Structure formats: C-alpha cells, structure tokens
Image: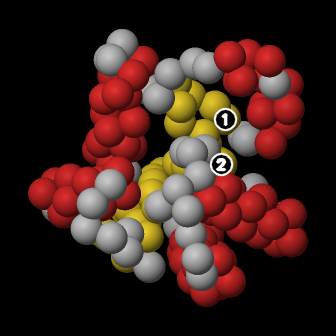
C-alpha cells in the first residue's frame, strides 16, 4: 500500500474559520481521491488544529473513507491526556507521542514535534498569517527541507 503523509500547522487563534474550513475540505477530499492511503498528522494546540480535526472527522463520516488515518501527534504526555485517554482514543484513529520532543525541555517540545512531523510528511499544509510564532517557524523549516507546501 502506498502511504502519503500530510501534516497540518496553523495559528492558535484564527479569524476566518469558514474560509479555512472550505480550503481544508477541498485539500483533504482531493488527497483522499488521488492517494491510496493518506496519513493526516495533526496537533491539538489551538483553533486551527481543532478545525482541521473537525474537517477530517466530518469528511470521514460523510464519505465513509477507509483510506486515511487521523493521527494526533503529541509533543509529550500530559495529565489531560491521561485523564481523558478513552475519549481521545475514540476521537482519533491513532495517537502518538513524538520521541524527539518527549525527551526535550518543554519550551522546545512543540518546535521539535513540528519538525518531526514535517520530516515524515510528503506534504505540509500551513496557515501562517504572521511572520512570527510556531506556525511561521514551521513554515520556514518546511521550506528549508524542500517539502511540498500548501499555504492557506
């Protein structure tokens, strides 16, 4: 089976959720039609991440998609995860803890997790409106690695 991996990154706070939702839906639907199996890597750290996950779940339900995996990549285990593990396991197809970031200082953990996600991805979808912050730094990293980037 041919695996195609996509990671999603964006700002913690977003303003134009309807526009972003439509863009994400188009990108994800196209990938699911064109690729044999798509691994969709997401975080869970703000509005954009939650929007991406919502779109993925809706598409999977509406189109009965069996050719994708909705994967939450955590930078490290948290107490919130431990207390709600059953609910998280029901929401995502897979949950991973990034090895590189789980061993790092918590202030570097998100950056290392994002870089690891980019490294394993064939495509990176990024919503970065500002030229600072984690989403922007991830965009710069993805550009340096030569990844296929869709900027929305």
As measured in the structure, the alpha-carbon distance from the residue carrying label 2 to the one carrying label 1 is: 6 Å
Q: Position of residue 39 (x, y in %)?
A: 55, 50
Image point (72%, 40%), residue name: 93
77 displayed left or right of 146: right
Q: Is residue 73 above or below residue 139?
A: above
**Quick one: SS at disc 2?**
strand
What crowding class fits label 2: few (fewer than 14 Cα within 10 Å), some (14-19), or many (20 or more)?
many
Looking at this view, is 109 or 72 the one in front? 109
* Mark found first going from the N terminus, 2 or 1: 2
Which quadrant, please, contains the C terminus?
A: bottom left
Image point (71%, 67%), residue name: 55
Q: Are marks 2 and 1 in contact (CB under 8 Å)?
A: yes
* Colouring chosen for the image of the structure: secondary structure
What crowding class fits label 1: few (fewer than 14 Cα within 10 Å), some (14-19), or many (20 or more)?
some
**Quick one: SS at disc 1?**
strand
Quarter-wise, where is residue 56 in the image?
Answer: bottom right
138 displayed left or right of 20: left
18 displayed left or right of 15: right
Image point (33%, 70%), residue name: 130
Image point (64%, 77%), residue name: 17
Residue 66 visible at all: yes
Q: Is residue 131 above or below residue 20?
A: above
Q: Position of residue 81 (x, y in %)?
A: 71, 23
Numbered mark located on residue 94 in the image: 1
Quarter-wise, where is residue 106 in the image?
Answer: top left
Residue 4 visible at all: no
Task: Tell me the residue that label 2 is attached to.
Answer: 70
């Amino acid at each position: 089976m041919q695996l195609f991996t996509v990671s999603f990154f964006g700002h913690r706070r977003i303003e134009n959720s309807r526009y972003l939702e439509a863009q994400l839906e188009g990108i994800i639907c196209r990938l699911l039609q064109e690729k044999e199996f798509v691994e969709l890597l997401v975080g869970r750290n703000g509005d954009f991440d939650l929007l991406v996950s919502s779109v993925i779940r809706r598409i999977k339900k509406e189109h009965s998609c069996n050719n994708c995996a909705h994967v939450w990549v955590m930078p490290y285990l948290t107490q919130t995860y431990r207390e709600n593990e059953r609910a998280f396991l029901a929401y995502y197809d897979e949950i991973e803890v990034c090895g590189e970031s789980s061993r790092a200082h918590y202030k570097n953990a998100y950056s290392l997790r994002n870089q690891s996600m980019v490294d394993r991805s064939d495509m990176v979808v990024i919503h970065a409106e500002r030229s600072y912050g984690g989403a922007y730094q991830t965009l710069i990293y993805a550009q340096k690695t030569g990844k296929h980037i869709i900027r929305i």
